[in-house]
């Protein structure tokens, strides 16, 4: 039985969509807010995720961005009332595979879900999630990296932080955003922890760690990655 994570804060929509998918022989796990969605996504396997954007506490955009730091494969569809072009563009940039606006017809949602599942099931060979910059290389699937000190293995947190920065290359990412996306929403380390991670990245990947070209500090805000 195929499994769906349905993230929707409006109870009537959540229960109606859940019932319709169950009638189509799907198993549906629901979450009414972003915090519960992240908990389910981190602990269980799903064949597809359907996520609203406007959620309590943590927006759907933030939920998907955090999921994509460790899970590139599960198809995700945004199902939302936010129907502006910039909203759709932002949703796809955050890592969604599809974007459907409310009001919607269930048959269309079902068709999109089935097509995404069919597409992913036909691609059993996982392509390496490689990122290259300068003479450096990082495989985000295996956490293996190549830099100044040869080949080495990143920790999971290092890989998540590095992925966040590289996917937002050219943008300033605040310390608060880093804490929320990489460490979660319940327990934060000190901001000094982030500083130490950045120092490690400079040691790993910069030709001159004291004059970094890739991992830049933005005083009072956070960090920026540039290629």
Image (cartoon, rainbow, N blue to C red):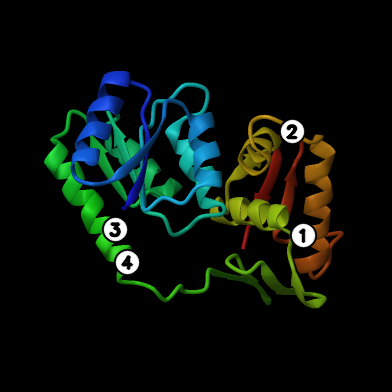
Give percent across and percent down for residue 198.
78, 52
Q: Is residue 156 visible?
A: yes
Q: Nearer the viewer, mark 2 or mark 1?
A: 2
Mark 2 and mark 1 residues within 8 Å of each other at the beta carbon = no
The foreground one among 18 and 140 is: 18
The answer to which of marks 2 and 1 sits earlier in the sequence is: 2
Tag 4 residue: 121
Q: Compare marks 1 and 4 and give the one earlier in the sequence.
A: 4
Residue shown at the point (72%, 56%) measured from the top left: 158
Residue 109 position within the rendered picture, expressed as x and y whole percent measured from the top left: 20, 42
| Pointers 4 and 3 in contact (C-beta within 8 Å) | yes
Tag 2 secondary structure: loop
Residue beneath label 3, please?
Answer: 117
Residue drawn at (45%, 72%), measured in percent from left and top?
126
Pointer 1 local density, CA inside 10 Å: few below 14, some 14–19, many at least 20:
many
Real-space CA distance between mark 2 and mark 1, rounded to the nearest whole angstrom:
20 Å
In the displayed structure image, the side of residue 77 where residue 42 appears, left or right: right
């Amino acid at each position: 039985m195929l499994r769906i994570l349905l993230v929707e804060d409006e109870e009537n929509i959540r229960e109606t969509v859940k019932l319709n998918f169950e009638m189509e022989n799907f198993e549906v796990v629901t979450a009414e807010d972003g915090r519960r969605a992240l908990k389910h996504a981190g602990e269980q396997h799903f064949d597809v995720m359907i996520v609203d954007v406007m959620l309590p506490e943590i927006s759907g955009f933030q939920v998907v961005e955090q999921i994509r730091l460790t899970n590139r494969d599960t198809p995700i569809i945004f199902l939302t009332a936010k129907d502006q072009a910039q909203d759709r563009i932002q949703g796809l940039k955050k890592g969604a595979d599809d974007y459907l606006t409310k009001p919607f017809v269930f048959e269309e949602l079902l068709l999109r879900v089935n097509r995404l599942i069919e597409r992913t099931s036909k691609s059993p060979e996982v392509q390496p999630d490689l990122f290259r910059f300068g003479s450096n290389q990082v495989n985000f699937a295996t956490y293996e990296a190549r830099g100044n000190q040869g080949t080495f293995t990143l920790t999971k947190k290092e890989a998540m932080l590095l992925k966040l920065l590289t996917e937002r290359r050219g943008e300033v990412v605040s310390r608060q955003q880093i804490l929320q996306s990489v460490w979660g929403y319940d327990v934060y380390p000190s901001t000094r922890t982030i500083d130490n991670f950045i120092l490690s990245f400079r040691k790993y990947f910069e030709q001159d760690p004291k004059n970094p070209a890739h991992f830049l500090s933005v005083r009072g805000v956070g960090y920026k990655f540039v290629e």
